[in-house]
Amino acid sequence: MRGELLEAERVHSIACSFFVVFNYYGGGGMCESAYTGALEHELTLRGHKVDREVMAAVYYKGKLVARQRLDMVVDERVVVECKATERLSPSAGPQLIAYLRATTYQVGVLLHFGPHPRFYRFVDTKKKAK
């Protein structure tokens, strides 16, 4: 698998959908749920299975210790975290990395619907690809 990006096609489709929604609404001004709803619709139009407000199991040393709400999961493979703030909090990236480490998901994307579109991809490299 060396040289290949995990979930490359899905992540590409998510990125394209993000920019379509961003270009439609522009940056800032809309609430996060509006951007997320539009993104869900765009991804569905592209043939993806989208689950919103997913309660994911959180494990500690193999024991279920909590449940965490994820904004969106695409095709049961990629976690999508959306932010609609003027400035992206420095904790947003670490938050998504923590979600990946604590759940069974390996790939996540952070989408910032701010004044300028920002797209970030994260991978939990300690997990084996499914």
Image: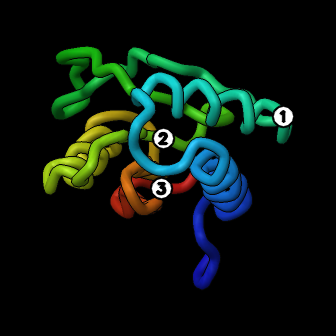
Q: Is residue 92 above or below residue 70?
A: below
Alpha-carbon distance for marks 3 and 1? 30 Å
Q: Residues within 10 Å of mark 2 (few under 14, many from 20)?
A: many
User: Which residue is tagged 3?
Assistant: 128
Q: Nearer the viewer, residue 91 or 57?
A: 91
Q: Residues within 10 Å of mark 1 (few under 14, many from 20)?
A: few
Alpha-carbon distance for marks 2 and 1? 17 Å
> Which type of secondary structure does the marked residue at label 2 adopt?
strand
Residue type for callout 3: Lys
Alpha-carbon distance for marks 3 and 2? 20 Å
Q: For residue 80, which numbered disc appears in the image?
A: 2
Q: Mark 3 or mark 1, which has the lower sequence index?
A: 1
The residue that appears at 69% across and 51% down in the rendered structure is: 20
Residue type for callout 2: Val
Q: Nearer the viewer, residue 102 or 78?
A: 78
The answer to whether mark 3 and mark 2 are in CB contact below 8 A is no
The residue that appears at 59% across and 71% down in the rendered structure is: 5
Q: Mark 3 or mark 2, which has the lower sequence index?
A: 2
Q: Nearer the viewer, mark 3 or mark 1?
A: 1
Residue type for callout 1: Leu
User: Which residue is tagged 1?
Assistant: 45
Q: Is residue 95 above or below residue 48?
A: below
| The quarter of the displayed image where residue 6 is located | bottom right
How many numbered badges does the structure rendering display? 3
> Which type of secondary structure does the marked residue at label 1 adopt?
helix
Query: Picture coordinates of residue 9 (x, y %)?
Result: 73, 60
